[in-house]
Image (cartoon, grey):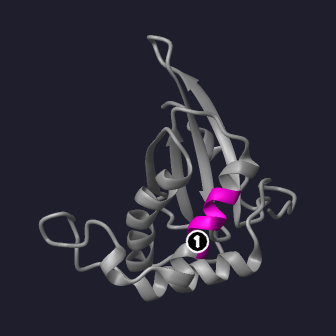
Amino acid sequence: MAEVESFTLDHTKVKAPYVRLIEEQKGPKGGTIANYDLRLAQPNQTSIETGGLHTLEHLFASLMRDRLDGIIDISPFGCRTGFHMISWYTYDTETVAKALKETLTEIRDSIEFSDIPGVSEKTCGNFKDHSLWSAKNWAKVILDEGISSDPFERKVV
């Protein structure tokens, strides 16, 4: 079985919320992608309920792209503690953390349900499972804790 980097990470040592560059991968034809860990909740202590996570996913898909070029995808972890962000560009973790902070601030302060992209039966595979209240609450919690540019040492941006 192939080794997966995230399964070798010691989840008992990380200090969420943080941004971590997991790895850069070169493709067979020369392109390079960067994979980031946007960890919002402390592993094995708490997790984001699916409605809030789903809403954050939809909002991140648009709002993070407004702030960082080259984002290919932002997808939630199955453990519901954060997201993978895949990008054509390699940004330093402080830059990504600042973009995440700005995004969460916008979610907390000004996003209304009508602003969330893709929340209809036609545009979402599980359109009934959204919670703006939860997304806003998590945005507040994360911003209050501060987002670190390092997973092991608190370097809040």
The structure residue drawn at horizontal position 61% and vertical position 75%, both measured from the top left corner, is: 105
Q: Confirm whether residue 9 shows in the render.
A: no
- Please name the amino acid that badge 1 sits on: Leu
Query: Residue 22 location, x and y as percent?
Result: 65, 41
Residue furthest left in the image: 122
Residue assigned mark 1: 104
From the image, give the main secondary structure of the stretch colored magenta: helix
Is the C terminus in the top left, top right, bottom left or bottom right quadrant? bottom right
How dense is the environment of label 1, judged by Cα within 10 Å: few (below 14), some, or many (20 and up)? many
Front residue of 92/84: it is 92
Disc 1 element? helix
Note whether 87 is above or below 122 in the view shown: above
The structure residue drawn at horizontal position 58% and vertical position 78%, both measured from the top left corner, is: 139
Q: Quadrant of residue 91?
A: top right
Query: Residue 69 location, x and y as percent?
Result: 52, 42
> In this rendering, would 29 be left or right of 26?
left
Residue furthest top in the image: 29
**Magenta span includes 119:** no
Q: Confirm whether residue 131 shows in the render.
A: yes
> In this rendering, would 5 be left or right of 66?
right
Q: Quadrant of residue 101?
A: bottom right
Query: Residue 130 location, x and y as percent?
Result: 33, 79
Note whether 14 is above or below 126 in the view shown: above
Number of marks drawn: 1
The structure residue drawn at horizontal position 45% and vertical position 88%, both measured from the top left corner, is: 133
The structure residue drawn at horizontal position 39% and vertical position 83%, both measured from the top left corner, is: 112
> In this rendering, would 38 be left or right of 59?
right
Span colored in magenta: 98-105
Note whether 88 is above or below 27 in the view shown: below
